[in-house]
Amino acid sequence: MTSRERLAATLNHQQPDRLCVDFGAGFQTGMGAGAVHRLRQRVLGQPDHRVKVIEPYQMLGEIDEELRQVLDLDVVGVHGPQTMFGFKNEGWKPFTMTDGTPVLVAEKFNVTPAPDGGWWMHPEGDTTAPPSAWMPQSSFFFDSLHRQGPLDEAKLDPADNCAEFGRLDTDTVEHFARQARRDFDTTSYGLYMTLPGMGFGDIALVPAPWARRPRGIRGVEEWYMATVTNRDHVRKVFERQCEFALQNIEVLAAAVGDRVQVAFVTGTDFGTQTGLFCSVQTYRDLYKPFHQAVCGAIHQRTKWKTFIHSCGAVVPLIAEFIDAGFDVLNPVQCSAKGMDPRTLKREFGRDVVFWGGGVDTQKTLPFGTPEEVYREVRERIGILGEGGGFVFNSTHNVQSNVPTENLLALFRAVNDARKG
């Protein structure tokens, strides 16, 4: 099979000729720039090469074509032109991470020193604007800053929390279409597309780190409280957001067509390490109607499989996700309560594709030995890969400080499993 055929078989719950593998197609399935840099040095050399930071919020490194080939990956990503900080990935320039890793960042990736020795990031790369995110000196990615002003609940306007949503302009639609045409026509990879503006309540997006002065409910705590104390207002935000989402599905479906095989819809986390963020009934009442609307529109107009990223112990919601129309579940956090891979495969493996869960990124991959990484990868492939319906990826992004020997053990295990 080609990679595209392999992904298609996997998404249709058929056993592919060999394991389908993704690293870097999505911003939830990638690697920190430091990890990519060191892995690339080990397998390709090229000491002067600088990895591009293609997602600056999480500081994810580009898995370029040369590395994709040597790692034998199957999927490439199609993404919008704007980053989480409101600037485009263009005009690359050198930057050095706090651990000394040399990388390339976009022209408007402009930071200023934070008091702890880390970095402040500024929306749209404008250092005259107040910072919207902070990377501590000991960290490898940014956290949004709390910029929530005083709230008058009597004057809340749903439009304020929808300032970032709207009908995609012609240039943005063409950007998606151009990427999809290029990768479909010139490669044999499977294509994964990130749909914009469809993550209802995605807490990474609520603070709007791209906005100079965001309006509405933008604090993490305030937003979660509003889903309980002011649910009607949150529902109105979602209704307005959904109107734009449905319009954009229509124009993207026409422009991109069925060149894309899977579409990332939402990254809203509904689970914690030990349980749900919200009750099953809250999901049904507040989120599910919008997920059904979006997934229904996608399935009506395209052959795209719909992808939900939701961390944590989401077992009680998986049947709800499936009923809402989701075809793919990620990151498959097997370390969370109740997320036993054998149980997941047995109970849900006929109805949802597992994309991730290939190795624990909380403990095993960063802190285990190479032998422990190898064993866990082989075990997860044996469980989740049986009968198809499994795209191998780690449980969420690989962090920048993961030992290179552990990454090499991961790919050794993948390759050995592919050989049978």
Image (cartoon, helix red, strand yellow):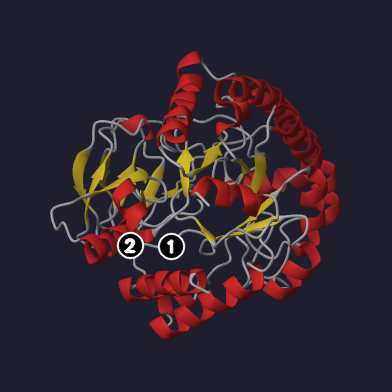
Q: Residue furthest top?
A: 170
Tell me which label, 1 or 2, sits earlier in the chain.
2
Q: Is residue 89 above or below residue 60?
A: above
Q: Where is residue 359 in the image (x, y as percent from the top left)?
A: 52, 71
Q: Which residue is drawn at 48% across and 77% down?
A: 364
User: Does residue 137 appear in this view?
Assistant: no
Kind of residue at disc 2: Ala
Q: Percent position (x, y) of residue 308?
A: 65, 48
Q: Do the residues labelled 1 and 2 touch (CB within 8 Å)?
A: yes
Q: Where is residue 397 in the image (x, y as percent from the top left)?
A: 47, 58
Rendered view: 324 above or below 344: above
Disc 1 marks a residue whose amino acid type is Val
Q: Is residue 34 above or below residue 86?
A: below
x and y percentages locating residue 185 in the rendered image: 44, 31
Q: In this view, does 321 lie to the left or right of 193?
A: right
From the viewer's perspective, is 398 left or right of 327? left
In the image, farthest residue toward the left: 48
Residue depicted at x 58% and y 71%:
381
20 or 41: nearer the viewer: 20
Q: Residues within 10 Å of mark 2 (few under 14, many from 20)?
A: many
Q: How many labels does the image show?
A: 2
Q: Is mark 1 on a helix, strand or loop?
A: loop
Secondary structure beneath label 2 = helix
Q: Nearer the viewer, residue 231 or 149?
A: 231
Image quarter for residue 412?
Answer: bottom left
How much space separates mark 1 and mark 2, taking CA atoms? 7 Å
Label ID, residue 398: 1
Q: Name the residue under label 2.
A: 35
Residue in the picture at 76% in, 64% down: 315
Crowd band around label 1 with a 10 angstrom C-alpha radius: few (<14), some (14–19), many (20+) = many
Which numbered tag is attached to residue 84?
A: none
Q: Residue 233's quadrant in the figure?
A: top right
